[in-house]
Amino acid sequence: SGEVFSLHDPSRDRAIEYHLILPRAGGRHPLVLFSHGSGGDFRSYGWIHRALVDGGYAVAALNHPGNAAGDNTSVGLLRVWDRPQDLSRILDDMLSRPALSAIIDAGRIGAIGHSSGGYTVLALSGGIFNPENMAAYCESDDRGPDCELAADAVAVDYTGASEPYRDPRVGAVVALAPAVGPAVESGSLGSVTIPVLIVAAVDDEILPHARHAMHYAGHIPGAELWELPAGGHFLFMQCNPVTYVADWFIEEFELCAEPAGASRAEIQRELAPGIVAFFDNELGAG
């Protein structure tokens, strides 16, 4: 839902389409940018979009070209550093359109993402990806299942991979089960100056908790870490018809598995107000 806008990024010859969902009330709204997980679809995260919109936030969500459901390539999966640039280009586009800049409070912008989207928003906060770090992790004894996701030997141009993609317009970020932790330079995380909340299940079956969520939380000054006792990596997604079909065909993952003793929907309902409150506190409510 929401109004659809499209832009062209000439620097990467990349077309980006995004959906803007606005609160019912008029006036000027703080904005939260949203980034889905690798190969995913922003529509699988309606629970958090609704909570934010109900809380007075405008939400801008996209499907990342080359790394989304129905448009996913091995190269797109590996080129994670394209993703933070997508969000910055959306922000450029919104603030350049008079009709949108009039209703967006440019002084109150946040970002939230899941998995590769978690890395994406942490890159906007200053985290720097180093492909050599990722290669070393995937050759080590504590390599995780995440190393199998891009097992195809594909030629990737790593130019720009380790550039800083910090966007000073973004004032607070929430990362849900953030990916590529071992690849992100500890020193870059140490220089993050904005408020960061990381939420992850300790039983994440794809991204080992110690090497991903805890790596980010341990190096970002003042980062909050909410550790969920169970639920796995896909806890933050809603199961919809697209997800169920994908689950049927993808044997490696249980996209729609329910955590023992709780339902995903219950956990999402419990998380949503806390996430909205985090943005309220850090971006300044009202």
Image (tube, rainbow, N blue to C red):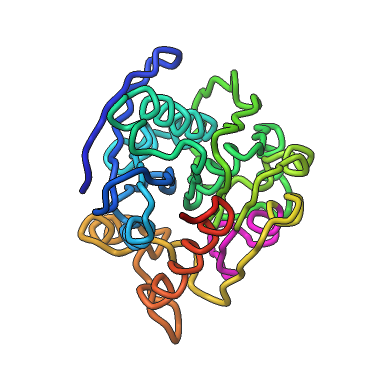
Q: Nearer the viewer, residue 239 or 268?
A: 268
- 63 displayed left or right of 272: left
Q: How many marks?
A: 0
Residue 199 at x, y percent in the picture? 56, 62
Residue at the (64%, 24%) spot, across then down? 163
**Quadrant housing residue 52:** bottom left
Q: Which secondary structure dominates the residues rendered in magenta?
A: loop
Q: Nearer the viewer, residue 207 or 175?
A: 175
Q: Nearer the viewer, residue 120 or 2?
A: 2
Residue 271 at x, y percent in the picture? 47, 70
* Rendered position, 65 above or below 115: above
Q: Residue furthest top?
A: 10
Q: Would you say residue 19 sits in the magenta stretch?
A: no
Q: Would you say residue 200 sits in the magenta stretch?
A: yes
Residue at the (59%, 22%) spot, across then down? 158
Q: Residue furthest bottom?
A: 261
Residue 215 at x, y percent in the picture? 71, 53
Can see residue 35? Answer: no
Question: What segment carries the magenta color?
Answer: 198-215
Residue at the (50%, 68%) spot, across then down? 274
Can see residue 161? Answer: yes
Residue at the (32%, 63%) spot, across then down? 238
Residue 44 at x, y percent in the picture? 31, 56
- 144 displayed left or right of 99: right
* Rendered position, 62 above or below 277: above
**Quadrant housing residue 27:** top left
